[in-house]
């Protein structure tokens, strides 16, 4: 048992006969999964044009006879997986379900050389060099290495389809211009052919300067007619081989990436030029709002996305979607929601969540992320969003995610992208049962561990709203004294905690600080502005607070900080102890691998506590 089967363990017990009604093709996957996995006598897959026009489905079961009904063939695929999941969980099969978001997308930060930016589970699953025969997906006609690769990609596709993910961006947002070379487009076509039966649409990240780097033009100015022409020709080339290509994801004028700003053009002008090229084919531009340091240098970094994009609101073409990270900074274990979701009133938006644990202990820490994402949805209504993207945590490690429990985050992302009303706890329970064991003692205990794990991580990494005090570059471990003159100030921990002899925290109030609170809607703007009403979990995010400030508990800020760091460490120690008791329920290899990682986590939690408290005490003591 090496964890490679993920949560897809419904046994090969089925021998059901499958019947089709009103549908010819596009259902091979549903057929195959059901005939291998459904334990009843027969299953009918039925198209019903009267149903809502989305990927939803209805399931009915009577006397071992299953009927899955959907408007689209994609719904039959999702219905089949849902039926198999419910069967595996011993739940009644009857239900109807529709996805809350139309776009349920993974973002791979995979580079063409096989490395993965912020990847902690090995190298990229895509082995571009092995995609030598791009004209067939008949595995018997493929070279052995490519056939094996195809099997792996199919397993990836099954995992995604089983939780409803319907789109994938294959490459890093820091994109290589080579991605759009004809040689790579052919490989992408092959990938799209492999993924299509699972209803997964392929998108690519593009480098805004590709017309220069690949096309030999002298400029990438979006208003230059030759540039527009270059993109139109390139897009047509893509659609000739991938007729259902999804579109482009763009990181522009951010962290050194080229963009329309290089020519004095706005984000809207840049995005619209690409959108115009994609529009005739139904393609979309997903434009990221993660920009800082260019036009608003010196402004509090968390304010810059709104400053930059608000003037563009209403100016984007209708096939542009603005994609923003859940928080205004950068995937910290806890951030207040990003106010850009409120501020862009006339622009379609998507949320970008990070499944890979860049700032949450990589694939070494057990941190279940569903509670963090649910927290985001409690501030930003899913109704405001066209879709959600998750920066994926998978790689070519045997168990896909490095940490067995990191698989839960991939699973939970998909489940929430389909239905953000599911509770974190329900998702944890089903995942544990599908992945490990249905024994109630195990499931109850480990659900509790998972449910507490995110708060534990916040406690030992960034209690009370401290943020971005991670080690430079790799972001594993603490570096509260971090400052490098050669780096942008917004990359330096000292910029964020602002500790001094009086107190600690970033004053973002309108009254005396950066004014970031003003970007929030009421009641949050007033709540965050006032130190008395600001929730303590965001206290040091919005306020510079005196060391001897009285917290709700009656303790001083300093004492409360100490308590949180210690609590984080205690929680991890409890996780370690609990896992030791789980040995009877888990196969040896997976048990051992998780145990090893928990030991690292306990060590790292102590490092966070000791380094941070040691550092901050130097300031706090002066205050005594
Ligand atoms: C930061 C990562 C960096 C990404 C960037 C982004 O450290 O590797 O390229 O975000 O999202 O979190 O563009």
Image (tube, grey):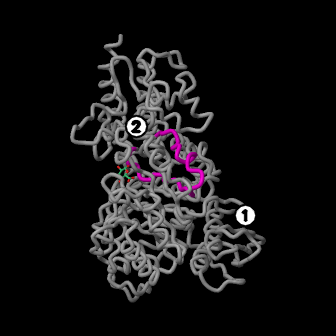
* x and y percentages locating residue 177 in the rendered image: 31, 69
Q: At x 38% / y 55%, what residue is drawn?
A: 402
**Residue lying furthest bottom:** 141
Magenta span includes 543: no
Mark 1 packing: few (<14 Cα in 10 Å), some, or many (20+)?
A: some
Q: What stretch is highlighted in magenta?
A: 334-359
Q: Which mark is residue 534?
A: none
Instruction: Please say whether residue 437 is visible from this viewpoint.
Output: no
The first of marks 2 and 1 along the sequence is 1
Q: What is the total number of numbered labels drawn onto the structure image?
A: 2
Q: In which quarter of the image is the C terminus?
A: top left
The vertical placement of 544 against 144, above or below, is above
List the residue tagged with mark 2. 300
Q: In this view, does 615 lie to the left or right of 565?
A: left
Measured in 3D between alpha carbons, the distance from the residue under mark 2 to the one under mark 1, in whole angstroms, is 46 Å
The vertical placement of 372 against 271, above or below, is above
Instruction: Please say whether residue 232 is visible from this viewpoint.
Output: yes
Q: Are marks 2 and 1 in contact (CB under 8 Å)?
A: no
The vertical placement of 586 against 207, above or below, is above
Q: At x 43% / y 14%, what residue is drawn?
A: 548
Q: At x 27% / y 74%, what residue is drawn?
A: 216
* Principal secondary structure, stretch drawn in magenta: loop
Name the residue nearer the viewer: 614 or 582. Answer: 614
> Element at badge 1?
strand
* x and y percentages locating residue 454 in the rendered image: 48, 41
Magenta span includes 345: yes
Q: At x 58% / y 47%, what residue is drawn?
A: 424
Name the residue nearer the viewer: 488 or 314. Answer: 314
List the residue tagged with mark 1. 96
* x and y percentages locating residue 495 in the rendered image: 33, 33
Q: Nearer the viewer, mark 2 or mark 1?
A: 2
Q: Quadrant of the N terminus?
A: bottom left
């Amino acid at each position: 048992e090496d964890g490679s089967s993920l949560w897809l363990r419904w046994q090969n017990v089925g021998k059901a006969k499958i019947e089709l009604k009103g549908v010819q093709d596009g259902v091979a996957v549903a057929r195959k999964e059901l005939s291998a996995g459904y334990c009843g006598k027969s299953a009918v897959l039925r198209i019903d044009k009267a149903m809502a026009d989305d990927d939803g489905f209805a399931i009915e079961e009577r006397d071992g006879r299953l009927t899955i009904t959907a408007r689209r063939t994609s719904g039959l695929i999702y219905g089949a997986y849902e039926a198999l999941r419910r069967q595996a969980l011993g739940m009644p099969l009857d239900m109807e379900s529709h996805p809350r978001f139309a776009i349920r997308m993974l973002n791979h930060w995979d580079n063409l050389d096989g490395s993965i930016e912020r990847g902690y589970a090995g190298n990229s699953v895509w082995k571009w060099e092995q995609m030598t025969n791009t004209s067939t997906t008949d595995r018997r006609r493929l070279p052995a290495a490519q056939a094996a690769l195809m099997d792996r990609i199919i397993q990836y596709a099954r995992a995604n389809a089983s939780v409803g993910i319907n789109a994938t961006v294959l490459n890093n947002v820091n994109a290589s211009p080579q991605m759009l070379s004809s040689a790579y487009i052919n490989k992408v076509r092959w990938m799209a052919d492999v993924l299509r039966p699972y209803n997964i649409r392929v998108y690519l990240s593009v480098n805004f300067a590709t017309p220069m780097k690949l096309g030999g033009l002298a400029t990438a100015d979006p208003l230059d007619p030759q540039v527009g022409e270059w993109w139109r020709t390139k897009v047509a080339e893509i659609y000739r081989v991938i007729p259902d290509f999804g579109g482009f994801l763009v990181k522009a004028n951010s962290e050194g990436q080229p963009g329309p700003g290089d020519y004095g053009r706005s984000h809207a002008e840049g995005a619209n030029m690409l959108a115009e090229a994609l529009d005739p084919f139904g393609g979309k531009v997903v434009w990221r709002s993660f920009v800082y340091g260019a036009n608003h240098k010196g402004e509090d970094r968390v304010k810059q996305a709104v400053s930059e994009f608000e003037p563009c609101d209403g100016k984007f073409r209708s096939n542009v979607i603005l994609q923003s990270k859940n928080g205004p900074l950068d995937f910290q274990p806890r951030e207040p929601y990003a106010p850009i979701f409120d501020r862009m009133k006339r622009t379609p938006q998507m949320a970008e969540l990070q499944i890979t644990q860049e700032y949450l202990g990589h694939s070494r820490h057990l941190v279940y992320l569903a509670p963090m994402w649910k927290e985001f949805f409690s501030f930003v209504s899913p109704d405001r969003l066209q879709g959600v993207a998750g920066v994926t945590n998978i790689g070519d490690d045997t168990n896909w995610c490095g940490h067995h429990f990191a698989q839960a985050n991939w699973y939970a992302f998909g489940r929430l992208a389909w239905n953000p009303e599911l509770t974190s706890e329900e998702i944890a329970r089903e995942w544990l049962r599908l992945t490990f064991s249905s024994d109630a003692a195990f499931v109850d205990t480990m659900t509790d561990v998972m449910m507490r794990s995110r708060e534990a991580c916040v406690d030992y990494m960034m209690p009370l709203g401290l943020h971005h005090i991670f080690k430079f570059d790799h972001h594993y471990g603490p570096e509260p004294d971090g400052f490098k003159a050669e780096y942008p100030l917004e990359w330096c921990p000292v910029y964020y905690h602002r500790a001094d002899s009086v107190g600690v925290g970033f004053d973002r109030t309108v009254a005396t600080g950066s004014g970031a609170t003003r970007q929030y809607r009421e009641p949050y703007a007033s709540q965050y502005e006032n130190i008395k009403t600001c929730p303590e979990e965001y206290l040091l995010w919005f306020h510079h607070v005196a060391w001897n400030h009285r917290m709700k508990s009656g303790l001083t800020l300093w004492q409360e900080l100490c308590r949180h760091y210690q609590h984080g460490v205690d929680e991890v120690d409890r996780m370690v102890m609990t896992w030791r008791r789980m040995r009877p329920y888990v196969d040896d290899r997976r048990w051992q691998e998780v145990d090893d990682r928990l030991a690292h986590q306990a060590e790292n939690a102590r490092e966070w506590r000791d380094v941070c408290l040691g550092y901050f005490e130097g300031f706090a003591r002066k205050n005594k």
